[in-house]
Image (tube, grey):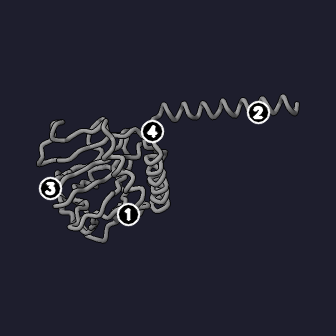
């Protein structure tokens, strides 16, 4: 076996922080507290408390709820900034699956190392988005296994976007305080949906051309 030497150098983390308005965070927490449906207690759904302890509120991305749409608009603005910073990541993506508002009690959190694309059902995930909805006095942020120098504490409105693969294995920092976050994914576009969208555009253009021909001969 050839004796190879690993050269250590400064490495880009590809984790991008940005800030959203804090009033959106307050409204999302209120929405979580007042919503009765689609909540899942992780201790009742098979999760060990050593792995994950909290409550997930699942949300459809095509909702008509104003505060949810305001938040998603912020995430889509954020990913455009991400693409400007990392143009190589700029592929056709959209928020296409359920995402979550998550509540973690004191001592709770997603405590185990994990990544966001680790099985067949998650293979179309491209980027993760996450927002801290409240300030955590003792930190309570997120740590990345392979980027130990990237330190982030939970601050209201602070949002992160990062790649979904094993390179960005991460976990929540357990806090003595309650924590609220939102987290979800930008998905690679489905081939069929892209084809159907293109077909609709072609059909619309064809109809417009036909109308112009009738109008101007």
Residue 165 seen in the figure: yes
Q: From the viewer's perspective, is the residue at label 1 or at label 3 nearer?
A: 3
- Give the Cα separation between the discs numbered 2 and 3: 63 Å
Q: Are marks 3 and 4 in contact (CB under 8 Å)?
A: no
Indicate the secondary structure of the residue bearing disc 4.
loop
Depth check, front residue: 163 or 129: 129
Q: Are marks 2 and 3 in contact (CB under 8 Å)?
A: no
Say which residue label 4 marks. Answer: 63
Vertical comparison of 185 with 25: above or below:
above
Q: Are marks 1 and 3 in contact (CB under 8 Å)?
A: no
Vertical comparison of 37 with 92: above or below:
above
Indicate the secondary structure of the residue bearing disc 2.
helix
How many residues crowd mark 2 within 10 Å: few (<14), some (14–19), many (20+)? few
Mark toward the start of the polypeptide (2 vs 3): 3
Furthest toward the right, the residue is 217
Say which residue label 2 marks. Answer: 209
How many residues crowd mark 4 within 10 Å: few (<14), some (14–19), many (20+)? few
Mark toward the start of the polypeptide (1 vs 2): 1
- Give the Cα separation between the discs numbered 4 and 1: 26 Å
Write the residue at 40% across / 38% down.
Answer: 60
- Give the Cα separation between the discs numbered 1 and 3: 25 Å
- Give the Cα separation between the discs numbered 4 and 2: 34 Å
Say which residue label 3 marks. Answer: 107
Say which residue label 1 marks. Answer: 17
Mark toward the start of the polypeptide (4 vs 1): 1
Depth check, front residue: 112 or 120: 112
Write the residue at 56% across / 34% down.
Answer: 197
Furthest toward the bottom, the residue is 9
């Amino acid at each position: 076996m050839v004796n190879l030497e690993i050269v250590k150098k400064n490495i880009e983390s590809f984790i991008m922080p940005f800030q959203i308005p804090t009033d959106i965070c307050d409204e999302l927490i209120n929405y979580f507290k007042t919503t009765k449906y689609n909540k899942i207690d992780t201790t009742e759904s098979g999760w060990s408390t050593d792995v994950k302890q909290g409550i997930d509120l699942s949300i459809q991305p095509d909702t008509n709820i104003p505060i949810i749409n305001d938040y998603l608009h912020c995430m889509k603005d954020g990913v455009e900034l991400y693409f400007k910073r990392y143009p190589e990541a700029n592929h056709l993506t959209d928020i296409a699956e359920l995402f979550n508002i998550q509540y973690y009690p004191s001592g709770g959190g997603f405590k185990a190392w994990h990544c966001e694309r680790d099985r067949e059902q998650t293979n179309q995930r491209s980027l993760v988005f996450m927002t801290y909805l409240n300030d955590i006095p003792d930190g309570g942020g997120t740590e990345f296994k392979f980027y130990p120098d990237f330190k982030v504490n939970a601050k209201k409105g602070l949002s992160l976007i990062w790649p979904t693969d094993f390179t960005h294995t991460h976990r929540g920092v357990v806090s003595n305080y309650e924590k609220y976050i939102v987290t979800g994914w930008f998905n690679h576009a489905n081939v069929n949906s892209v084809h159907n969208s293109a077909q609709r555009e072609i059909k619309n253009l064809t109809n417009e051309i036909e109308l112009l021909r009738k109008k101007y001969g």
